[in-house]
Amino acid sequence: QFDIEIKAEDEDSEVASATQTLKLKFVDDVTVWGTIAGDGFDIAEEQVVKRSQIAEAPQMKINITSLDGIENFLVDINGATIDGALQAVGLAGEFDLANPDEALATSLAGLAAMDIVLPSGDAIKGKKELAFDLTSFIPMIAALGEGSVSFKITVKDAAGHAVSETLTVTIDDDLTLSIASDAIGEEPLEILKSVATGETPTPVVVDIVADQGIANLTVKIESSSDYFMAIFGEATGIPAEFDLANAPEALAEKLAEIGLIDPENPVKDATEVQFDITDFIPMIFTAMAGDPDADPALPAEEECTADFTVTVKDGANQTKTATVALSLKDDSTEE
């Protein structure tokens, strides 16, 4: 907007005898912008939604004004996580909500069955103002997994003006589990006794990031070595399943003795925790050595498996589970 002030002065005075202001305002024929809960944002900037916020997610809208009325409202949705779901309802590609054909109407009905209702036809055609609400898409995107989805909106008016904008929405996990040594997967991580008891053992660490704070951190230990399961519980008094965040005092002391928790850094309500079982693995190999003096004698085991299943629940009731699967092999007798 520009204000042009015009002053007229007489010949004998510096004082203006008349003043007029010409106001000029330049506007786009078609404008597109975004709002979250009524607050504007740059539609070209990625919008990150934390998973814990989704249950109470504020409204996310793309707003359009068109001085000559909307003639076409083209939408193109893309993303690695959502493409399959869109294909299932026939929306793989750009579609015009202002001019829906029979196939698009069927596809929109499919979305409506998933509680995603999009305006179309007369609800868009000819409108000079429109708020395109994407809020119902957010839970769907989140349910499909972590990742980004782009919404490309192209608006054309009756006079031939057109504007295209793309909004990218990213679902961000605020509860993550990552395990060193790639110890998550279908194949167990193989650990040799010579390595586990050596100077530089293979690190096996569960890194936990919980933006909402840890409410529970449950660990379940399972092993194909009956000797280990029996000796572990008998020697340490630690059950095969326990909650590191809410351990009773006596159990907490035992867990601290073997280095599974740090009394100076409580797990409860922490936003970042490292659950390190690297020093725990030699205990399994000790049990695998057996006990020839026992009655009956316990023969040595050359190999076994051990699984540590970690389940984290955060302050927003989000839960994630990961299993550290280990294959332990005693190579001390190999030539």
Image (cartoon, helix red, strand yellow):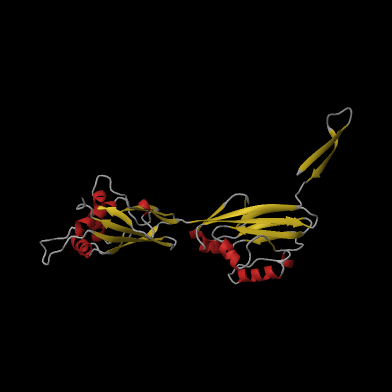
Name the side, left or right, on which 315 lies relative to 30. left
Q: How many marks?
A: 0
Instruction: Identify the residue shown where x is 32% and y is 50%.
Output: 203
Residue at the extreme right of the image, as rendered: 11
Q: Nearer the viewer, residue 323 or 62?
A: 323
Where residue 300 sits, quadrant-wise, is bottom left
Residue 260 pos. (x, y %): 28, 54
Residue 162 pos. (x, y %): 74, 53
Query: Does the image show residue 246?
Result: no
**What is the quadrant of the N terminus in the image?**
top right
Q: Nearer the viewer, residue 73 or 291?
A: 291
Instruction: Identify the residue shown where x is 28% and y is 45%.
Output: 200
Residue at the extreme front of the image, as rendered: 335
Name the side, left or right, on which 136 lies relative to 290. right
Query: Does the image show residue 299?
Result: yes
Q: Nearer the viewer, residue 214 or 142?
A: 142
Where residue 103 sits, quadrant-wise, is bottom right
Residue 281 pos. (x, y %): 26, 54
Residue 91 pos. (x, y %): 63, 64
Q: Nearer the viewer, residue 53 or 289?
A: 289
Name the side, left or right, on which 265 lies relative to 123. left
Instruction: Identify the residue shown where x is 66% and y is 52%.
Output: 165
